[in-house]
Amino acid sequence: MTQRIGIMGGTFDPIHIGHLVTAQEVYERFDLDKVIFMVAGKHPLKQRHVTPAGQRLEMVEIAIRDNPHFEASDYEVKRKKVTYTVDTLRHLHNVYPEDVEFYFITGADALFEIIEWKDAHELAEMTILVGATRPGYTIEQAQQRHEHAEEKFDIRYLEVPALAVSSTDVRHRVEQGRDVRYLVTDGVADYIRAHNLYTGK
Ligand code: ATP
Ligand code: MG
Protein backbone atom coordinates (compact mmCIF):
# COMPACT_ATOMS: atom_id res chain seq x y z
CA MET A 1 0.00 0.00 0.00
CA THR A 2 1.17 3.47 -0.87
CA GLN A 3 2.42 5.38 2.13
CA ARG A 4 1.30 8.97 2.54
CA ILE A 5 3.63 11.13 4.55
CA GLY A 6 3.14 14.74 5.58
CA ILE A 7 6.10 17.08 5.87
CA MET A 8 5.73 20.16 8.03
CA GLY A 9 8.80 22.29 7.48
CA GLY A 10 9.60 25.29 9.60
CA THR A 11 12.00 27.23 11.75
CA PHE A 12 9.85 26.38 14.78
CA ASP A 13 11.26 29.17 16.92
CA PRO A 14 9.26 28.05 18.82
CA ILE A 15 6.77 25.42 17.67
CA HIS A 16 3.23 26.55 18.62
CA ILE A 17 -0.30 25.21 18.51
CA GLY A 18 -0.87 26.63 15.00
CA HIS A 19 1.73 24.17 13.68
CA LEU A 20 0.31 21.30 15.71
CA VAL A 21 -3.35 21.84 14.84
CA THR A 22 -2.48 22.22 11.17
CA ALA A 23 -0.42 19.03 11.12
CA GLN A 24 -3.18 17.09 12.86
CA GLU A 25 -5.83 18.46 10.50
CA VAL A 26 -3.80 17.44 7.44
CA TYR A 27 -3.05 14.04 8.99
CA GLU A 28 -6.76 13.32 9.35
CA ARG A 29 -8.01 14.91 6.16
CA PHE A 30 -5.55 13.14 3.83
CA ASP A 31 -5.44 9.92 5.79
CA LEU A 32 -1.69 10.16 6.24
CA ASP A 33 0.52 7.53 7.83
CA LYS A 34 2.49 10.17 9.71
CA VAL A 35 3.66 13.76 9.71
CA ILE A 36 7.36 14.59 9.87
CA PHE A 37 8.30 17.93 11.43
CA MET A 38 11.34 19.05 9.48
CA VAL A 39 13.27 21.54 11.54
CA ALA A 40 15.19 24.06 9.44
CA GLY A 41 18.90 24.41 10.02
CA LYS A 42 20.74 27.42 8.67
CA HIS A 43 18.23 29.52 6.83
CA PRO A 44 19.35 31.46 3.78
CA LEU A 45 16.75 34.18 4.27
CA LYS A 46 16.04 34.67 7.97
CA GLN A 47 18.01 37.65 9.19
CA ARG A 48 17.01 37.94 12.83
CA HIS A 49 18.68 36.05 15.65
CA VAL A 50 17.46 32.47 15.48
CA THR A 51 17.58 30.10 18.46
CA PRO A 52 20.20 27.34 18.04
CA ALA A 53 18.83 24.49 15.97
CA GLY A 54 19.37 21.93 18.72
CA GLN A 55 17.04 23.81 21.03
CA ARG A 56 14.39 24.34 18.35
CA LEU A 57 14.52 20.62 17.63
CA GLU A 58 14.19 19.79 21.35
CA MET A 59 11.09 21.97 21.60
CA VAL A 60 9.53 20.17 18.63
CA GLU A 61 10.30 16.80 20.21
CA ILE A 62 8.70 17.92 23.47
CA ALA A 63 5.62 19.28 21.71
CA ILE A 64 4.90 16.12 19.70
CA ARG A 65 5.99 13.41 22.12
CA ASP A 66 2.47 12.32 23.02
CA ASN A 67 1.38 11.93 19.37
CA PRO A 68 2.46 8.59 17.85
CA HIS A 69 1.72 9.88 14.32
CA PHE A 70 4.11 12.80 14.58
CA GLU A 71 7.86 12.55 14.17
CA ALA A 72 10.70 15.10 14.32
CA SER A 73 13.57 15.03 11.85
CA ASP A 74 17.06 16.37 12.48
CA TYR A 75 18.06 15.92 8.83
CA GLU A 76 18.33 19.62 7.96
CA VAL A 77 19.73 20.54 11.36
CA LYS A 78 22.55 18.02 11.04
CA ARG A 79 23.64 19.21 7.60
CA LYS A 80 26.39 21.78 7.76
CA LYS A 81 25.30 23.47 4.56
CA VAL A 82 22.22 25.53 3.94
CA THR A 83 19.51 23.04 3.03
CA TYR A 84 16.71 23.80 0.65
CA THR A 85 13.38 21.99 0.69
CA VAL A 86 14.19 20.42 -2.66
CA ASP A 87 17.35 18.85 -1.15
CA THR A 88 15.32 17.44 1.72
CA LEU A 89 12.70 15.96 -0.58
CA ARG A 90 15.37 14.36 -2.74
CA HIS A 91 16.75 12.80 0.43
CA LEU A 92 13.32 11.58 1.55
CA HIS A 93 12.62 10.10 -1.86
CA ASN A 94 15.84 8.11 -1.51
CA VAL A 95 14.97 6.89 1.96
CA TYR A 96 11.34 5.90 1.38
CA PRO A 97 9.85 3.40 -1.09
CA GLU A 98 9.37 4.66 -4.60
CA ASP A 99 5.59 4.90 -4.49
CA VAL A 100 5.42 7.03 -1.33
CA GLU A 101 3.36 10.21 -1.59
CA PHE A 102 4.64 13.28 0.19
CA TYR A 103 2.33 16.05 1.33
CA PHE A 104 4.30 19.20 1.97
CA ILE A 105 2.31 21.33 4.37
CA THR A 106 2.54 25.10 4.20
CA GLY A 107 0.74 28.07 5.63
CA ALA A 108 -0.47 30.73 3.23
CA ASP A 109 2.78 32.69 3.45
CA ALA A 110 4.98 29.78 2.44
CA LEU A 111 2.43 28.76 -0.19
CA PHE A 112 2.85 32.16 -1.77
CA GLU A 113 6.64 32.05 -1.74
CA ILE A 114 7.28 28.46 -2.78
CA ILE A 115 7.39 29.24 -6.49
CA GLU A 116 10.57 31.18 -5.84
CA TRP A 117 12.22 28.42 -3.86
CA LYS A 118 15.21 26.57 -5.26
CA ASP A 119 14.33 24.18 -8.12
CA ALA A 120 10.61 24.77 -7.69
CA HIS A 121 9.81 22.87 -10.89
CA GLU A 122 11.45 19.75 -9.46
CA LEU A 123 9.84 20.32 -6.09
CA ALA A 124 6.47 20.38 -7.84
CA GLU A 125 7.14 16.88 -9.16
CA MET A 126 8.24 15.48 -5.84
CA THR A 127 5.42 16.50 -3.55
CA ILE A 128 1.77 17.33 -3.24
CA LEU A 129 1.38 20.75 -1.69
CA VAL A 130 -1.13 21.36 1.07
CA GLY A 131 -2.03 25.00 1.49
CA ALA A 132 -3.45 25.61 4.93
CA THR A 133 -5.25 28.87 5.37
CA ARG A 134 -3.94 30.91 8.17
CA PRO A 135 -5.65 34.00 9.51
CA GLY A 136 -4.17 37.25 8.30
CA TYR A 137 -3.00 35.70 5.06
CA THR A 138 -5.49 35.29 2.26
CA ILE A 139 -4.80 32.38 -0.05
CA GLU A 140 -6.40 34.10 -3.04
CA GLN A 141 -3.16 35.88 -3.79
CA ALA A 142 -1.23 32.65 -3.54
CA GLN A 143 -3.81 30.84 -5.67
CA GLN A 144 -3.56 33.45 -8.41
CA ARG A 145 0.18 33.32 -8.32
CA HIS A 146 0.18 29.57 -8.77
CA GLU A 147 -2.29 29.79 -11.64
CA HIS A 148 0.10 31.99 -13.56
CA ALA A 149 3.30 30.20 -12.64
CA GLU A 150 5.19 27.83 -14.88
CA GLU A 151 5.84 25.44 -12.01
CA LYS A 152 2.67 23.39 -11.76
CA PHE A 153 2.20 22.24 -8.20
CA ASP A 154 -0.53 19.79 -7.26
CA ILE A 155 -2.13 21.88 -4.54
CA ARG A 156 -4.79 20.83 -2.05
CA TYR A 157 -6.30 23.60 -0.02
CA LEU A 158 -7.36 23.09 3.53
CA GLU A 159 -9.04 25.30 6.07
CA VAL A 160 -7.63 25.03 9.53
CA PRO A 161 -9.49 26.22 12.63
CA ALA A 162 -8.77 29.91 13.07
CA LEU A 163 -5.44 30.27 14.76
CA ALA A 164 -3.72 33.61 14.54
CA VAL A 165 -0.73 32.25 16.44
CA SER A 166 2.78 32.81 15.13
CA SER A 167 6.22 32.18 16.54
CA THR A 168 6.89 35.90 16.21
CA ASP A 169 3.95 36.65 18.50
CA VAL A 170 5.10 34.03 21.01
CA ARG A 171 8.62 35.51 21.08
CA HIS A 172 7.25 39.03 21.57
CA ARG A 173 5.06 37.95 24.42
CA VAL A 174 7.94 36.29 26.22
CA GLU A 175 10.10 39.36 25.71
CA GLN A 176 7.36 41.49 27.27
CA GLY A 177 7.15 39.12 30.23
CA ARG A 178 3.72 37.90 29.23
CA ASP A 179 2.38 34.37 29.53
CA VAL A 180 2.50 32.09 26.47
CA ARG A 181 0.50 29.35 28.11
CA TYR A 182 -2.07 27.82 25.70
CA LEU A 183 -0.23 29.24 22.67
CA VAL A 184 2.46 26.61 23.04
CA THR A 185 2.25 23.26 24.83
CA ASP A 186 3.03 23.22 28.55
CA GLY A 187 6.28 21.36 27.92
CA VAL A 188 7.42 24.01 25.44
CA ALA A 189 6.46 26.83 27.81
CA ASP A 190 8.54 25.15 30.54
CA TYR A 191 11.45 24.74 28.14
CA ILE A 192 11.36 28.40 27.12
CA ARG A 193 11.45 29.43 30.77
CA ALA A 194 14.15 26.94 31.79
CA HIS A 195 16.44 28.01 28.95
CA ASN A 196 15.66 31.68 29.25
CA LEU A 197 14.72 31.96 25.58
CA TYR A 198 13.28 35.09 23.91
CA THR A 199 13.91 37.38 26.88
CA GLY A 200 15.99 39.70 24.74
CA LYS A 201 18.91 39.22 27.13
P1 ATP B 1 7.66 33.21 12.42
O1 ATP B 1 6.62 34.10 13.02
O2 ATP B 1 8.97 33.24 13.13
O3 ATP B 1 7.81 33.34 10.92
P2 ATP B 1 5.84 31.00 12.13
O4 ATP B 1 4.80 31.00 13.18
O5 ATP B 1 5.47 31.52 10.77
O6 ATP B 1 7.15 31.72 12.68
P3 ATP B 1 7.42 28.97 10.90
O7 ATP B 1 8.33 28.04 11.59
O8 ATP B 1 8.00 30.13 10.15
O9 ATP B 1 6.39 29.53 12.00
O10 ATP B 1 6.39 28.23 9.95
C1 ATP B 1 6.45 26.90 9.58
C2 ATP B 1 5.23 26.57 8.72
O11 ATP B 1 4.05 26.65 9.51
C3 ATP B 1 5.00 27.54 7.55
O12 ATP B 1 4.52 26.80 6.45
C4 ATP B 1 3.93 28.47 8.08
O13 ATP B 1 3.17 29.03 7.03
C5 ATP B 1 3.10 27.51 8.92
N1 ATP B 1 2.36 28.16 10.02
C6 ATP B 1 2.85 28.96 10.97
N2 ATP B 1 1.90 29.36 11.83
C7 ATP B 1 0.74 28.79 11.41
C8 ATP B 1 -0.63 28.83 11.87
N3 ATP B 1 -0.99 29.53 12.96
N4 ATP B 1 -1.55 28.12 11.18
C9 ATP B 1 -1.18 27.41 10.08
N5 ATP B 1 0.08 27.34 9.59
C10 ATP B 1 1.04 28.02 10.24
MG1 MG C 1 6.97 32.12 9.31
Image: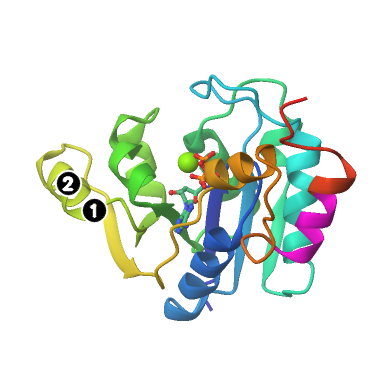
Colouring scheme applied when the structure was drawn: rainbow
| Numbered disc 1: secondary structure | loop
Q: Residue at x 42, y 52 (%)?
A: 106
Confirm or deny contact between disc 2 and disc 1 (CB under 8 A).
yes
Left or right of 100, for residue 29: left
Q: Which residue is drawn at 30% across and 64% down?
A: 156
Q: Can residue 12 be seen in this view?
A: no
Residue 97 is drawn in which quadrant?
bottom right
Q: Name the residue under label 2.
A: 141
Q: Which residue is drawn at 77% across and 37% down?
A: 197
Q: Can residue 166 be seen in this view?
A: yes
| Numbered disc 2: secondary structure | helix
- Crowd tier of the residue under label 2, counting other residues whose Cα lies within 10 Å: few below 14, some 14–19, many 20 or above: some
- The residue lying toward the viewer, choosing from 78 and 182, is 182
Q: How much space separates mark 2 and mark 1, taking CA atoms?
A: 7 Å
Residue 175 drawn at (x, y percent): 67, 37
Q: Residue at x 22, y 39 (%)?
A: 151
Q: Mark 1 points at which residue?
A: 138
Residue 44 drawn at (x, y percent): 52, 21
Left or right of 82, for residue 68: right
What stretch of residues is rendered in magenta? 185-191
- The residue lying toward the viewer, choosing from 198 and 125, is 198
Residue 90 drawn at (x, y percent): 53, 40
Residue type pointed to by label 2 = Gln
Vertical side of 43 occupied by 35: above or below? below
Vertical side of 16 occupied by 197: above or below? above
Residue type pointed to by label 1 = Thr
